[in-house]
Structure formats: structure tokens, C-alpha cells
Image: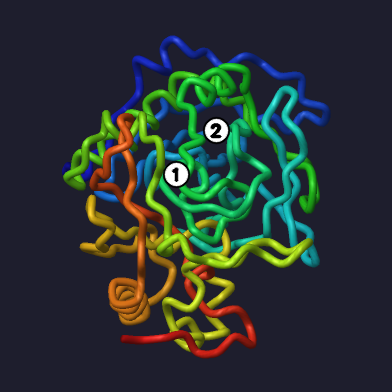
């Protein structure tokens, strides 16, 4: 799959943005069609918005078929309070308030690049359970809130939720609220889902089988002790890389959902390759992360609809691979 950008003009033609009553006159309306960037290890939806004088670009990114979308806003019209550490925002018209860590960079042409991190359009069965990993929304071994290895991502539920969303509003940590009238997200999210599924084919996996897994890839060999009462269970992947692999000064670069580590795991549970999506760390550090994960990682393979082992993948943040603080330097073989 070569990297291409596809204009979603047909989608845009059927999705005239439904006006939302802005409370303060700061609403931005679409000034372009949706465009979908088919990357080799990411999918990116983009659209430009304007209020007549200022412009904001909205990007939605996904690195594999799961419920998380990385939400990015580019434009100097979004002005943050200098002391704000988080940004409050929500999907319109009735989404609950969300808090994104303040992660701000600058584009090559001097525009503010505001990364609100990963967000789900909808919550799915399994949310609120133990920390998990695999191909569902819990893909990302250190992301808490999901049952390990259980596929909980429903494309149908996500599309249904997206159909009821027609805007994004920032009103926390900003000097003036900003509102994007996106129009219904149903068709753009459907296109995003198709792009993410297509990535699996590019990686050599069975994309149709992935939709009906009875178990996603699980880190560890299943022998981890149960957690202490009142404690979250430790991720089996903790300690697969040394404590010093990611420098303390680099931990901030992992905020916002970047630098996702993808491990391909075959039907025997063997890790066969490793790659990093949307890298935020330098190439040498990421090469070291992958080298150690391939050497130290243990996995239980994904299971297809009939309960048979199948080639699949596992995605996580480097944060879930380091030893617990005070827990040593990790291990090498």
C-alpha cells in the first residue's frame, strides 16, 4: 500500500455541515473537503475550517483498526492560557467533557500544532475492566481500561456514534472557546475504518479474520500472578526494555499517542518483527526498543472465530515496556 491522499469529495457532497449555534461567535465552518491520507502505518483524515478570517486544520489519525483516534488541531487561532496544562474539549452536540494533556509543537510554517491525544467516539464493551492489549481498543499494552486479549472494538457502534457527532468544541484551557462545525462524522469514520483494515492486508494479515477474533494477541505467557487487592494488575510487558532505554527527559515526547510500538506475532505466539508508528523518539532509541521487545517479549497468539491461532499483531506505548519505577533495569537475554 503506497502512501496516497484521497479527496473525499463524494463524502463531502453528501455531508453539508449542520450549523451549530455557537455560543460566542467563534464557530468555524468547513473550507475544504475531507481528505484521507493512506500511509503505510497510519490513516489520517484532514479538513480545513475557517471563521472568515482565521483558519484551523483538523486531523484525525489512526495507526491500526481500533477505537482510538488521535485528535490534532493546527492553527494559531487557538490561543491557550500560558499556565494551562490540559485542554478541555468535547464532541458536539452532546458529548461529555474530555481533558487532553497540553501537547503543543510548531509546524514548519509557524503554525501551532495542538495534539489532544487519543480519544474514542464511543465506549465499548470491556471498557472499565482490567488493563489490556491486543487488536481492539485496548491495543496498546499499557492502556488501562480493557480486558486483556478481548476484542471489544465494534465498527458498527463507532459508525452509529459518529453519525450523531457534528462538531468539536474546545472550551477549557483556551482564552476563547473554539468550535468546529464538522458535519456528521459517519462517512468520514467509515472511510477511516476501511483505511485501517486495509493496513492489515498490507502487513500480510487476514483483515476479514481480524474482524471476528475471539482473542487478540495477549502479552505474556498467562502465568502472571493476580494483582494485590485494590491494585491494577501489572502489565506482563513491564520490564521488556531497560529503564534507561527511554531517557527521563524523553517521557514527555510520548504524550499524545505517538511512538506506538507494533509487534507482529505469528500463530505460535512468536514475535516476528517490530515497527514504530508516528515516531516521537529518535531512530536509535526506537531501534533499541524493538530489539529488546523481540528478545524479551512473550505472547499468546490471537484466536480466530473458530478459536484457532492466527497471525496477528500487538500495539503498545513504550511506557508499558519499561520496568515499574523502582523495579530495576529490565532484562535482556
Q: Residue at x 57, y 84 (%)?
A: 248
Considering the image in quadrants, where does the C terminus appear? Answer: bottom left
Considering the image in quadrants, where does the N terminus appear? Answer: top left
SS of the residue at dot 1?
strand
The mark closer to the camera, 2 or 1, is 1
Q: Residue at x 56, y 40 (%)?
A: 55
Mark 2 or mark 1, earlier in chain: 2
Residue 68 drawn above or below residue 276: above
Give how far across and how far down residue 275 sits, in percent. Answer: 29, 63
Label 2 crowding class (10 Å Cα cut-off): few <14, some 14-19, many 20+? many
Give how far across and how far down residue 4 sits, in percent. Answer: 23, 40
Q: Which residue is drawn at 36% across and 29% down?
A: 212
Give how far across and how far down residue 43 sits, in percent. Answer: 36, 41
Q: Horizontal placement of 189 versus 88: left or right?
A: left
SS of the residue at dot 2?
strand
Label 1 crowding class (10 Å Cα cut-off): few <14, some 14-19, many 20+? many
In-front residue for pair 155/97:
155
Kindly indicate the quadrant of the structure image that contains residue 207.
top left
Residue that lies at the very extreme toward the top in this rendered image: 14
Residue 219 drawn above or below residue 303: below
Query: Would residue 73 be visible to someone looking at this image?
Result: no
- Residue, disc 2: 49
Whole-number angstrom distance, CA of label 2 to CA of label 1: 17 Å
Q: Horizontal placement of 22 versus 199: left or right?
A: right
Q: Residue at x 34, y 37 (%)?
A: 196
Q: Which mark is residue 61?
A: 1
Amino acid at each position: 500500500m503506497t502512501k496516497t491522499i484521497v479527496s473525499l469529495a463524494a463524502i463531502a457532497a453528501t455531508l453539508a455541515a449542520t450549523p451549530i449555534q455557537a455560543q460566542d461567535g467563534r464557530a468555524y465552518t468547513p473550507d475544504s473537503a475531507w481528505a484521507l491520507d493512506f500511509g503505510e502505518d497510519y490513516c489520517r483524515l484532514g479538513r480545513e475550517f475557517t471563521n472568515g478570517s482565521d483558519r484551523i486544520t483538523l486531523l484525525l489519525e489512526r495507526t491500526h483498526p481500533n477505537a482510538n483516534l488521535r485528535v490534532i488541531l493546527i492553527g494559531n487561532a487557538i490561543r491557550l492560557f500560558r499556565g494551562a496544562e490540559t485542554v478541555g474539549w468535547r464532541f458536539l452536540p452532546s458529548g461529555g467533557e474530555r481533558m487532553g494533556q497540553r501537547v503543543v509543537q510548531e509546524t514548519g510554517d509557524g503554525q501551532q500544532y495542538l495534539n489532544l491525544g487519543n480519544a474514542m467516539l464511543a465506549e465499548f464493551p470491556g471498557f472499565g475492566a482490567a488493563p489490556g492489549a491486543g487488536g481492539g481498543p485496548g491495543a496498546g499494552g499499557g492502556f488501562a481500561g480493557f480486558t486483556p486479549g478481548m476484542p471489544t472494538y465494534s465498527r458498527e457502534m463507532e459508525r452509529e456514534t459518529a453519525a450523531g457527532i457534528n462538531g468539536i468544541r474546545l472550551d477549557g484551557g483556551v482564552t476563547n472557546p473554539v468550535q468546529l462545525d464538522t458535519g456528521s462524522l459517519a462517512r468520514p469514520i467509515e472511510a477511516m475504518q476501511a483505511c485501517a483494515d486495509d493496513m492489515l492486508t498490507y502487513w500480510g494479515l487476514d483483515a476479514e479474520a481480524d474482524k471476528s477474533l475471539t482473542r487478540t494477541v495477549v502479552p505474556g505467557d498467562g502465568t502472571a500472578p493476580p494483582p494485590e487487592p485494590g491494585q491494577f494488575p501489572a502489565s506482563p510487558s513491564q520490564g521488556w526494555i531497560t529503564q534507561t532505554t527511554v531517557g527521563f527527559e524523553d517521557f514527555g515526547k510520548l504524550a499524545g499517542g505517538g511512538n506506538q510500538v507494533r509487534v507482529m506475532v505469528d500463530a505460535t505466539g512468536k514475535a516476528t518483527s517490530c515497527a514504530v508508528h508516528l515516531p516521537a523518539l529518535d531512530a536509535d532509541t526506537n531501534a533499541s526498543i524493538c530489539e529488546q521487545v523481540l528478545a524479551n517479549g512473550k505472547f499468546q497468539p490471537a484466536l480466530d472465530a473458530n478459536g484457532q491461532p492466527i497471525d496477528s499483531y500487538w500495539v503498545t506505548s513504550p511506557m508499558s515496556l519499561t520496568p515499574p519505577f523502582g523495579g530495576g533495569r529490565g532484562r535482556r537475554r
